[in-house]
C-alpha cells in the first residue's frame, strides 16, 4: 500500500532533521493528515510499525492531527465539513463546491535528542 | 542527455530493465542512513512544517523540467489492471509512425508488458516495483536515464494497474490519462475520484463489447465530470483499432514539440 511510501517519506524527513541538529533520535513527532489525504489510518499504523524499526523514529511517540476536510458552496458561500467529494451543500443542495483543506500530509514538528 | 549531477545511483527492491540489454540498475528503497553523532544533553523542538510527499514532488519537478527543456511530451497512463493500457499502447505505437515514441512500463513483476511493446520496435524500459503498488518520480527518473529519449519525442509511462495509489504520486508528466473499460462499472469515477480529478483525458476502452454489458456511457461521463469538470473523453476499441486515430490526434494537439523557448 502507498502508506508505506508515506512512512518512508516521514522517515526521510526525520533522518534529515536529526542529522541537521546533530541529534541521535526523535523523541516525538507531530503529523498533520487531512481526512481526504488518501491515507488510511490502519494501513498507516501497520506500515509505521514495520518501517520505523532501527531508524531514528523507532521509539518515537507519534501524534496525528487530523485536519477535517471542508467545502465552500460556490452558490451560497457557506462552509461545511465533508466526508467525500460528492456531498451537496446542506443549505442549497448544490454540488458546486470548492474544497478547502483536508488533503494535508505533513510533518508539523518533531522533538529530537 | 539527462542530468550529470543528480547522483542517482541509489540502492534496492525496485529493478529497472531496459529491454534488449542485460544490465539492471537496482534501486534500494529501504537503505537508511545511521548518523554517528555525539549525544546531546538537551531535547530540541524542531518546527518542520514539511509536506511528506515533498521528496517525490521535487523529483517529479526535476523530471518535468527535463521534459520541458527537451520539448518532450510525457503521458502517465493510469487504470485498473486489465483495462487495456498495454493493448492501447501497442496499437498507438503501430499507428503513430510519424511520432518518435518511448515507453516506460510499470508492474510489480515480469517483463511481459515491456516485451509486448518491444515487438513494436519502440525503445522500452520495464520498472518492477516488487511489492510496490505505484510508480514514483524517482523510479521514472532512473528509467529516463536508461531510455535517454530524444528531444520532441513522446514518453508514455504505463503506471501499475491501480486506481488508488498512483493518484498521490506526481511523476513529472505533462498529462495524466485515465483508462476505463466498458466491462468495469460505469460508477468507477465516483469510486475513485482522486484519479479522475487529476486526469486530463478519460479513455473509455473495449467499446466493441458495449452491446453485451450494462455500461451507461453518459452516466460514467457525468460522474467523471463531477470529479473534474474539465475532463475530456475518447471512446475506443484498442483490439479493433477503433478510435485510435482520434487518440493520436489528441496526442498531436497536446504535443510540446512545437513549443520552443528562445
Image: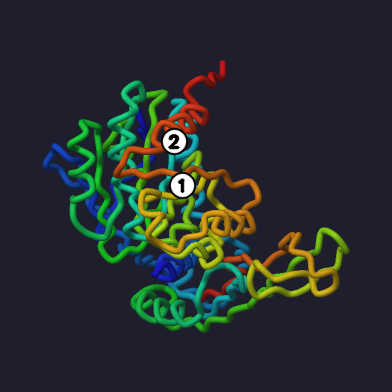
Q: Is residue A19 visible?
A: no
Q: Residues within 10 Å of mark 1 (few under 14, many from 20)?
A: many
Q: Is residue B258 visible?
A: yes
Q: Earlier in the sequence, mark 1 or mark 2?
A: 1
Which residue lies most toward the top here? Answer: B262
- Please state, as top left, top right, bottom left or bottom right, where the N terminus of chain B lies in the image: top left
Say which residue label 1 marks: B203
Vertical side of B154 occupied by B257: above or below: above
Question: Numbered disc 1: what chain?
Answer: B
Question: What label sits on residue A93 in the rendered view?
Answer: none
Say which residue label 2 marks: B247
Q: Are marks 1 and 2 on the same chain?
A: yes
Which of the 4 image quadrants contains residue B117? top left
Instruction: Tell me what residue is drawn at x 52 percent, y 65 percent.
Output: B187
- Please state, as top left, top right, bottom left or bottom right, where the C terminus of chain B lies in the image: top right
Vertical side of B61 occupied by A21: above or below: below
**Which is nearer the eye, A93 or B111?**
A93
Instruction: Tell me what residue is drawn at x 17 percent, y 40 percent.
Output: B19
**Which is nearer the eye, B29 or B164?**
B164
**Which is nearer the eye, B22 or A26?**
B22
Instruction: Tell me what residue is drawn at x 49 percent, y 33 percent.
Output: B250
| Residue B58 location (% of width, % of height) | 50, 48
Q: Are marks 1 and 2 in contact (CB under 8 Å)?
A: yes
SS at circle 1: strand
| Residue A8 location (% of width, % of height) | 41, 66
Viewed as shown, does residue B146 lie left or right of A33?
left
Vertical side of A25 occupied by A101: above or below: above
Question: Numbered disc 2: what chain?
Answer: B
| Residue A90 location (% of width, % of height) | 80, 74
| Residue B199 location (% of width, % of height) | 53, 49
Viewed as shown, does residue B216 lie left or right of B72?
right
Amino acid at each position: 500500500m502507498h502508506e508505506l511510501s508515506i512512512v518512508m517519506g516521514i522517515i526521510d524527513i526525520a533522518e534529515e532533521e536529526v542529522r541537521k541538529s546533530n541529534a541521535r533520535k526523535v523523541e516525538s513527532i507531530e503529523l498533520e493528515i487531512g481526512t481526504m489525504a488518501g491515507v488510511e489510518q490502519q494501513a498507516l499504523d501497520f506500515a509505521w510499525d514495520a518501517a520505523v524499526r532501527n531508524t531514528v523514529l523507532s521509539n518515537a511517540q507519534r501524534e496525528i492531527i487530523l485536519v477535517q476536510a471542508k467545502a465552500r458552496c460556490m452558490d451560497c458561500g457557506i462552509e461545511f465539513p465533508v466526508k467525500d467529494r460528492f456531498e451537496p451543500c446542506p443549505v442549497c443542495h448544490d454540488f458546486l463546491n470548492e474544497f478547502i483543506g483536508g488533503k494535508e500530509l505533513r510533518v508539523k514538528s518533531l522533538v529530537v535528542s | 542527455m539527462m542530468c550529470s549531477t543528480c547522483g542517482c545511483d541509489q540502492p534496492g527492491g525496485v529493478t529497472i530493465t531496459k529491454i534488449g540489454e542485460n544490465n539492471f540498475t537496482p534501486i534500494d528503497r529501504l537503505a537508511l542512513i545511521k548518523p554517528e553523532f555525539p549525544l546531546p544533553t538537551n531535547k530540541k523542538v524542531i518546527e518542520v512544517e514539511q509536506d511528506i510527499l515533498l521528496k517525490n514532488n521535487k523529483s517529479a519537478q526535476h523530471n518535468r523540467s527535463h521534459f520541458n527543456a527537451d520539448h518532450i511530451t510525457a503521458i502517465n497512463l493510469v487504470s485498473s489492471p486489465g483495462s487495456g493500457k498495454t493493448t492501447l499502447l501497442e496499437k498507438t505505437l503501430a499507428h503513430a509512425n510519424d511520432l518518435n515514441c518511448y515507453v516506460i512500463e510499470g508492474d510489480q513483476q515480469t517483463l511481459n508488458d515491456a516485451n509486448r511493446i518491444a515487438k513494436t520496435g519502440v525503445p522500452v524500459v520495464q520498472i518492477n516495483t516488487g511489492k510496490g503498488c505505484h510508480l514514483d518520480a524517482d523510479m521514472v527518473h532512473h528509467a529516463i536515464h536508461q531510455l535517454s529519449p530524444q528531444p520532441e519525442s513522446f514518453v508514455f509511462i504505463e503506471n501499475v494497474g491501480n486506481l488508488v495509489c498512483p493518484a498521490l504520486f506526481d511523476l513529472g508528466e505533462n498529462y495524466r490519462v485515465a483508462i476505463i473499460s466498458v466491462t468495469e462499472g460505469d460508477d468507477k469515477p465516483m469510486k475513485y475520484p482522486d484519479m479522475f480529478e487529476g486526469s486530463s483525458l478519460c479513455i473509455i476502452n473495449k467499446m466493441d463489447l458495449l452491446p453485451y454489458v450494462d455500461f451507461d456511457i453518459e452516466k460514467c461521463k457525468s460522474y467523471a465530470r463531477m470529479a473534474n469538470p474539465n475532463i475530456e473523453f475518447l471512446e475506443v476499441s484498442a483490439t479493433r483499432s477503433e478510435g485510435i486515430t482520434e487518440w493520436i490526434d489528441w496526442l498531436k494537439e497536446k504535443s510540446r514539440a512545437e513549443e520552443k523557448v528562445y
